[in-house]
Image: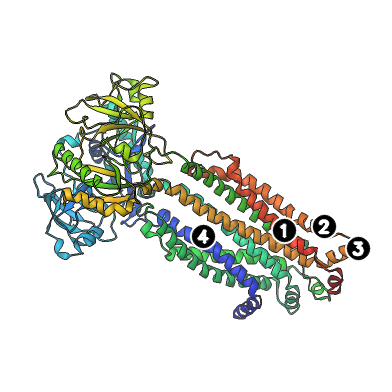
Amino acid sequence: MLSDLKISIRRIARSPGFAFVAILTLALGIGASTAIFSVVHALLLAPLKYRAADQLVQVQSRHQELGPGGLAPATFGDVATGNSSFETLAAQYYYYVNLTGTATPALLNSGEVTADYFKLFDVAPLRGRTWTAADLKAGAPPIAVLGHALWQSQFNSSDSIIGRQIMLDDVAHTVIGVMPESFKDPSDVAQLWRPMRTGADDLLNRSSRYWTVFARLRSDRELLSTNVELATIAQRLALGYPKNYDGWTLRAEDLRRFVVGDYRTGLLVILGAVACVMLITCANIAGLSIVRASTRRKELAIRTALGSSRLQLIRQLILENLILAAAGGSLGVLFASWGVDALIASLPAGWLPRSGEIAINLPVLLVTFTLSTFAGVVSGIVPGFTASRINANDALKDGARGSTGIAARRLRGGLIVIEIALALMLLAGAGLLGRSFIGLMHKKTGLDASRVLSLTVSLPEKRYGNPNLCWSFFSRAETEVAAVPGVEALGFTRTSPFRWGIPTDYAPLNLENSTAAAKLPQAFSDSVSVDYFKALGIPSQSGRIFSPSDDHRAPSRVILSETAARRYFGRENPIGRFITSGGSMRFEVVGVVGDVRRSGLTADIPLQVYHPLAQRTPAFATLMVRTALPPASLAKEIQAALWRVDRDVPVSDVAPMENYVRRSVTQPRLYLTLFSIFAALALVLAGVGLYGLISFSVGQRSREFGIRMAMGASSGAVAGLVLREGTKLIAIGLVIGSAGTFIGARLLQSMIYDTSLFDTAAYLPVLLLAVTSLLACYIPARRATKVDPIIALKAE
């Protein structure tokens, strides 16, 4: 075996050009596969970083029309007492809190959790402790457990933080613990945790499904039987409380699915694209190896005459390809490392779940080793079987041709057909994704996000508990910010388009309890200041926008989006009409404004109801500032203006509004980028493979071409002969690839938006494959016409 290894290395060293092309081709294919598998492994395969993570589930409500949701507090109690499947059950919801008394006030995301939360995840604190039963009693002093990142950033990793008091919403909380760096809540959102202290009224709530519930299955229970039990509980609740549970059921899902969200299907499709590239890579190397083996007929014949068996010859050729694959795999790991770094750097922070776990680790390296071995064996065994089927006597005769015959030629042609078919499928997929993405980018957002800076302001509840105090702050803040040079318009909004919203039930007056009202979709409820529409460039359609007179002394008024007005009042004029929310209040419609795709460019246009900020004044709002200069250049001045009103008010999430609009298409942009890279790589590999095959064929048939031209054949006839050989392979590959495309395109349905699978414009990149393939045939065909008959015949 050692001698075979030495011989293989010497043979490779004698063909540096072949080795360079083979290693680079393998490196590209294996590198792309490794990079994408590192993402897939982190998101879909690697166990979650909790003890016995396969026993953790998320419990959710699910409506037959509205889809999944959380659990209402009372439902959580029903599940906790009515099930026998869960070892531990815990709930959480997020709550913004202001951290003050530090160098810079900060807005934090607090995880409000039930008693058994840390027990559920079986995690011990890095410092201090978590809560006990005494900490959960009514009237117990407020406490908090810090996340590791918050402990580092705000408290310099000080051990003395345990037992100290910090100010959250102007209320002193005693820090009792710090969690380890490895612990994150499943959504990786919470920066600290506080025990949920619910009142009796909260626990009777059956309509607000805002608790996210997690559970640990008992070791003897499976998900299927658990869901049967949950469905039984849901049926019992529907009978007892039909108003709250009609059409709803309960279901548990693997926690990994909750963490990964809607990325599973897209990543698996991308992984399929990588597999296509890997197959093309193997086919290319196999074709190159067949060509190389055909030039070694005499060498192999001599080895056969000296007693080498067919198995030994095959082993020798496979070993050579394994050496090439090992070199290509090693270089591919380097390419993959660069690719992963570039991918993570290109993604917005926190956008991709588990992005911090994406790395070239041991499982990924094992896959790289497997891919390299697979590529080496597959690309070596095919030419090995072909080249070993030689007749030693014929091969050793003088003038024997360096050809492996019709079978080898057909095999090389078959490999090229496979490459073209797979490349066609990838190019068609990239075309569909590109067409979809272009369509998304041409959708009107309904607002003008250019030169708009977004800032989140959170008022401490203890000092701003009165809405009048909140309104006073916002009014003074608008005056201060408006005085900053370069500010053109500004307005406050309770929520933030393209980030988050508050879905609320609304209905036309006198229809709120009807069947028709029950079928109305929820609308996003917002409170905005007078110049909000001007700041974001949202056009007025009819009626008027808010004025300073729409304050707490005026009747309750609203402005509707165009779609909301149409759904509530049809073709009737909505101005002067009334809508209600829950039947408790009525609001006069004073205007209609344009629709805003606030849920993102990939979502449908939602209904929107705007209230005057002066009538519904929150303690938490987002400031939108239109500037004459680049928005980021005014960020510090605008923050300083807000702090001149109150230095202890946290100002966070400072970013140009365009960032949030672009972020709404980050996922389709990522899919398009990756798919396009693989399609381009497949195009290059298929073109190189076809060029290599035709070039080799021309070289092998130089004597034939010389004879033809000596007998009077024109250059065009010789070129046509070569082109026919190539175009035949191209045509077969395109036909097979087209059939595979229409099957594979259906896998992309969840990744494309408002684009037909049969959109002809989406398949224009396929023309690039045809042109590239024809060019790969034309160049060697043209070279065939340059054959000198005399020189070709002398060489024989």
Q: Are marks 3 and 4 in contact (CB under 8 Å)?
A: no
Q: Residues within 10 Å of mark 1 (few under 14, many from 20)?
A: many
Q: Amino acid at mark 3?
A: Met
Which is more toward the observer, 715 or 502? Answer: 715
Kindly identify the amino acid type of the residue bearing the numbered disc 4. Ser
Q: Are marks 3 and 1 in contact (CB under 8 Å)?
A: no
Task: Provide the residue designation for mark 2.
Answer: 716
Residue 244: x and y, percent? 28, 29
Marks 3 and 1, how far apart at CA: 24 Å
Sequence-first tag of 2 and 1? 2
Marks 2 and 1, how far apart at CA: 14 Å
- Asked whether the beta carbons under mark 4 and mark 2 sit within 8 Å of each other, the answer is no
Q: Amino acid at mark 2?
A: Gly
Distance in Å between CA atoms under marks 4 and 2: 43 Å
Which quarter of the rendering shows the N terminus? Answer: bottom right
618 with respect to 221 (left or right): left
Label 4 sits on a secondary structure element that is helix
Kindly report which numbered mark, 3 or 4, lies closer to the viewer in this rendering.
3
- Chain-order first, disc 3 or disc 4: 4
Label annotation for residue 777: 1
Q: From mark 3 to mark 2, how far is it between C-alphas? A: 14 Å
